[in-house]
Image (spheres, helix red, strand yellow):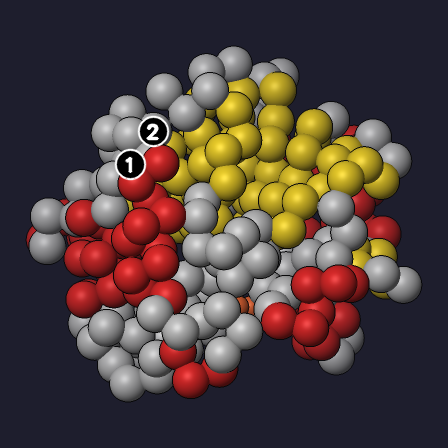
């Protein structure tokens, strides 16, 4: 049994926005993902840190969910990214997955999942790109705290789409919640190409931070623990 993380698969199998054209390692990214997932076993859990599909609706993202569901890994936990326009209420997403037999896909949103002694928490997060929308920001803080609270006294890992810190930028409210709830490590996505060099990798205060965007990981899910 092992735990993996990868974000930003940016799939477009049922819509028409393939990432191959962007270069920077994205050529053939669907095949690279398939290859990268060969390290994942049937009992393993993979957390998918948002920006998963370009589909504008659940239906338009269906081929991408089918691709993700068919990849190795008995359990994939899906987080929302800023490009996941197909995102819906948990009830609708779970019903859609159930109807199509996508049995490995689960939504990480206002909740948490067990992994051994750990609780896997997470939400989309917030980034200064969102130009100070206080309502969205407050809602994300509430969601993050709901997820961390759901974990109770268990050891915690936290998964976000947006980086809570960046070279020259921190989001103090999010860092404070991670520290207050004793999160050991935080994994995030969203940063691509030239932005990789601005990522914070490693310890900052009591929490260690790791970028898990697919192009940063060469499309190979990163193993967090056995
Ligand atoms: Fe992304
Ligand atoms: Fe993103």
Q: Is residue 116 above or below residue 220?
A: above
Circle 2/circle 1 CB separation < 8 Å: yes
Q: Name the residue that disc number 2 marks.
A: 44
Figure quadrant of residue 41 = top left
Residue 222 visible in the current orientation: yes
* Residue 139: % across, % down: 62, 59
Q: Name the residue that disc number 1 marks.
A: 73
Residue at point 90%, 63% (across, down): 168
Determine whether the beta carbon of the residue marked 2 sits less than 8 angstroms from the nearest atom of ligand 1.
no
Residue 49 visible in the current orientation: no
* Residue 6: % across, % down: 48, 49
168 or 157, nearer to the observer:
168
Instruction: Please give left or right for residue 122 compared with residue 36 in the image.
Output: right
Q: Residues within 10 Å of mark 2 (few under 14, many from 20)?
A: some
Q: Is residue 123 above or below residue 194?
A: above
Residue at point 19%, 66% (across, down): 62
Label 2's element?
loop
Figure quadrant of residue 30 = bottom left
* Residue 55: % across, % down: 31, 75
Figure quadrant of residue 190 = bottom right
Residue at point 35%, 55% (across, down): 33
8 or 36, nearer to the observer:
36
In the drawing, what numbered circle is on residue 118? none
Q: Is residue 2 above or below residue 8?
A: above
Residue at point 53%, 52% (across, down): 217
Label 1's element?
loop
* Residue 181: % across, % down: 72, 29
């Amino acid at each position: 049994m092992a735990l993996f993380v990868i974000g930003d698969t940016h799939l477009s199998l049922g819509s028409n926005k393939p990432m191959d054209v962007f270069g920077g390692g994205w050529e053939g990214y669907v095949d690279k993902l398939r290859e990268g997932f060969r390290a994942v076993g049937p009992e393993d859990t993979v957390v998918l840190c948002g920006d998963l599909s370009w589909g504008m609706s659940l239906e338009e993202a269906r081929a991408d969910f089918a691709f993700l569901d068919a990849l190795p890994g008995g359990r994939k936990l899906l987080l929302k990214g800023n490009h996941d326009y197909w995102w819906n209420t948990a009830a609708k997403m779970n019903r859609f997955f159930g109807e199509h037999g996508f049995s490995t896909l689960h939504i990480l949103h206002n909740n948490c999942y067990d992994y051994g002694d750990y609780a896997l928490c997470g939400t989309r997060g917030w980034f200064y790109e969102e130009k100070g929308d206080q309502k969205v920001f407050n809602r994300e803080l509430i969601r993050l705290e709901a997820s961390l609270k759901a974990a109770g006294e268990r050891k915690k890992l936290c998964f976000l789409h947006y980086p809570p810190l960046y070279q020259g930028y921190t989001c103090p409210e999010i860092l404070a919640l991670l520290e207050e709830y004793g999160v050991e490590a935080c994994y995030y996505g969203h940063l691509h190409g030239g932005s990789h060099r601005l990522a914070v990798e490693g310890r900052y205060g009591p929490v260690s931070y790791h970028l898990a965007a697919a192009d940063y990981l060469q499309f190979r899910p990163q193993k967090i623990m056995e």
